Image (spheres, rainbow, N blue to C red):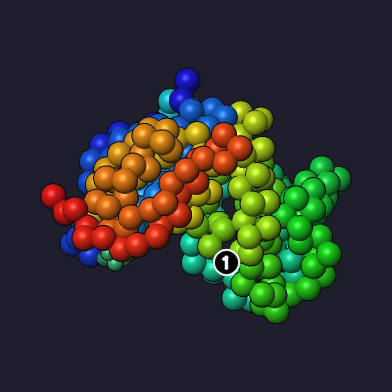
Amino acid sequence: MSLLDIAGLDVVLGGKSLVRGLSFEIGEGELLGLVGPNGAGKSTLVKAVAQLLEYRGEIRFQGRPLNALSARERARCLAYLSQEDPVQWPISVRDLVGLGRHPYRGSWWRGAGRSGTGDLEAIESAMRLTDVWRLRERRVTELSGGERARARLARVLVVEAPLILADEPVAALDPRHQLQVMQLLRSACQSGRGVLVVLHDLTLASRFCDRLVMMDRGELIATGTPTEVLTAENLARTYGVRAVMGEHDGQGYVVPWDTSEPLRS
Ligand code: ADP
Ligand code: MG
């Protein structure tokens, strides 16, 4: 069974149609990359899946409409990493990551805020995986952009949700941490979870994702394996670039090299 089914999704914001008729699914254990140029509607789509925007069409999680789940159920089944960094208050990295355990804690009148041993283990493990363990006492407002991005990712991983939505999680990271984060998302899938990840780095998309969805101007342009989606024609049509493409160690790479006239239909 697919983990997430999106059928005929439409999102209209401020009178503008930002996502039009999008349909695709994410299977259990699948790492699905969402690619497309700036303004294509990727973040809008991800926010709709996270139930942060109104939409028309169906979004089903394990066969059930996502908007029919209670807020608490939803908070346990999907974890969302936004593209914008909303962390403006000076809490420690450890406390930020701890917020990700909130869906498992009792209501405040039953002792909210108390962390069980399982919580503490999950929090430490997520901080170690994202390489922020040594930063755990630091205030998030005093970290570099990349360090903060990793702390935010730890907060998402600690939810241990079956579905992870990550909007440009590697945009601020150095090459080593980009690879680490992609490996992390890959290994999250090995336990049967599904991941939807927005990426601009087409080599990372090609190497790490099982399948890609390419969007432009609110519409689906192509879906399939990275090789099927990242064709010279699709890259020219959506991004207006020519790319150097090849294979290394049996994996594809795509390096945008030159601008080209976008093939607008
Ligand atoms: P992407 O993530 O692919 O770069 P977005 O989903 O953020 O694109 O935005 C898609 C388009 O929707 C852009 O043209 C953007 O300007 C527009 N947009 C985003 N938010 C709003 C909004 N609240 N009201 C109107 N237009 C918006
Ligand atoms: Mg975006």
Residue 42 at what x, y percent from top left? 37, 53
Asked whether residue 241 is in view, the answer is yes
Q: Is residue 4 left or right of residue 191?
A: left
Extreme residue toward the left, this view: 265
Residue located at (61% from left, 43% from top): 185
Q: In which quarter of the image is residue 57?
A: top left
Image quadrant, ligand 1: bottom left
User: How many marks overall?
Assistant: 1
Q: Is residue 236 left or right of residue 138?
A: left
- Which residue is nearer to you in this view: 154 or 119? 154
Q: Tell me the amino acid under the disc marked 1.
A: Ala
Q: Quadrant of residue 26?
A: top left
Mark 1 = which residue?
172
Residue 140 at what x, y percent from top left? 69, 72
Residue located at (54% from left, 27% from top): 28
Tell me if mark 1 has few (under 14), some (14-19) or many (20+) residues whose alpha carbon lies within 10 angstroms of its own.
some
Residue located at (57% from left, 66% from top): 172
User: In the picture shown, does residue 63 fall above or below 48?
Assistant: above
Residue located at (31% from left, 63% from top): 259
- Which residue is nearer to you in this view: 213 or 236? 236
Residue 65 at what x, y percent from top left? 40, 33
- Which residue is nearer to you in this view: 120 or 144? 144
Extreme residue toward the top, this view: 1
Task: Give the SS element for disc 1.
Answer: loop
Q: In this view, does 234 lie to the left or right of 107?
A: left
Residue 231 at what x, y percent from top left? 34, 42
Asked whether residue 159 is in view, the answer is no
